[in-house]
């Protein structure tokens, strides 16, 4: 079959059963490892929209998203374990092509300043190619000087 140009790639199709679940799992693993920025960006559509609800920041394309995340800036060092965050909940609706992930960014150092842990909820929308087209982040940033004050709820178990 390979001689006539037909290959066995049906299981790699974005529409194959379980493909979106696998994409989400791969995205989470890549994000947690925080080693391969190009791989991380590959999960996003070119015209992705991101809203960081607490910072009040939004982007409308992959280039702006790359500048926002910019893993090479700030000399980040993870202080608790090897992953950037732990998960407490993952909800995936394959029919609606939506996911919600909840967890906690672990303590880390950014530009010599200790930050975290930060609880978060992220909403993701995927297109038919399993690329993220929309991301909404709710991150409980601490210290509050990063935003506008308030109580630290990051240590409250939910």
Image (tube, helix red, strand yellow):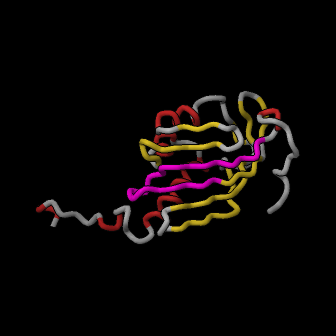
Q: Position of residue 11 (x, y in %)?
A: 34, 67
Nearer-the-camera pick, 125 or 111: 125
Name the residue: 47% across, 34% down.
Answer: 63
Q: Is residue 119 above or below residue 110?
A: below
Residue 67 located left or right of residue 13 = right
Q: Which picture quadrant has residue 77?
A: top right
Q: Main secondary structure of the magenta part?
A: strand
Does the magenta segment cover residue 126?
A: yes
The C terminus is located in which quarter?
Answer: bottom right
> In front here: 98 or 36?
98
Q: Position of residue 119 (x, y in %)?
A: 75, 51
Figure check: 67 above or below 24: above
Q: Position of residue 113 (x, y in %)?
A: 78, 31
Q: Residue furthest left?
A: 4
Name the residue: 52% across, 53% down. 27
Q: Is residue 71 magenta?
A: no
For residue 12, side relative to residue 73 (left or right)? left
Q: Which residues are magenta?
A: 122-141
User: Is 87 drawn above or below residue 60 in the view shown?
Assistant: below
């Amino acid at each position: 079959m390979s001689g006539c140009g037909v290959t066995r790639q049906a299981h790699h199709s974005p529409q194959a059963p379980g493909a979106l679940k696998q994409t989400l799992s791969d995205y989470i693993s890549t994000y947690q490892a925080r080693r391969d920025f190009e791989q991380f960006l590959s999960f996003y559509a070119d015209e992705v929209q991101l809203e960081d609800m607490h910072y009040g920041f939004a982007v409308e394309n992959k280039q702006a998203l790359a500048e926002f995340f910019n893993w090479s800036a700030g000399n980040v060092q993870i202080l608790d374990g090897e992953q950037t965050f732990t998960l407490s909940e993952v909800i995936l609706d394959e029919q609606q092509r939506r996911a919600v992930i909840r967890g906690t960014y672990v303590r880390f150092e950014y530009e010599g300043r200790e930050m975290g842990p930060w609880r978060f909820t992220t909403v993701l929308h995927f297109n038919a190619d399993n690329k993220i087209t929309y991301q909404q982040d709710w991150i409980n940033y601490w210290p509050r000087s990063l935003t506008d004050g308030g109580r630290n709820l990051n240590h409250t178990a939910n």
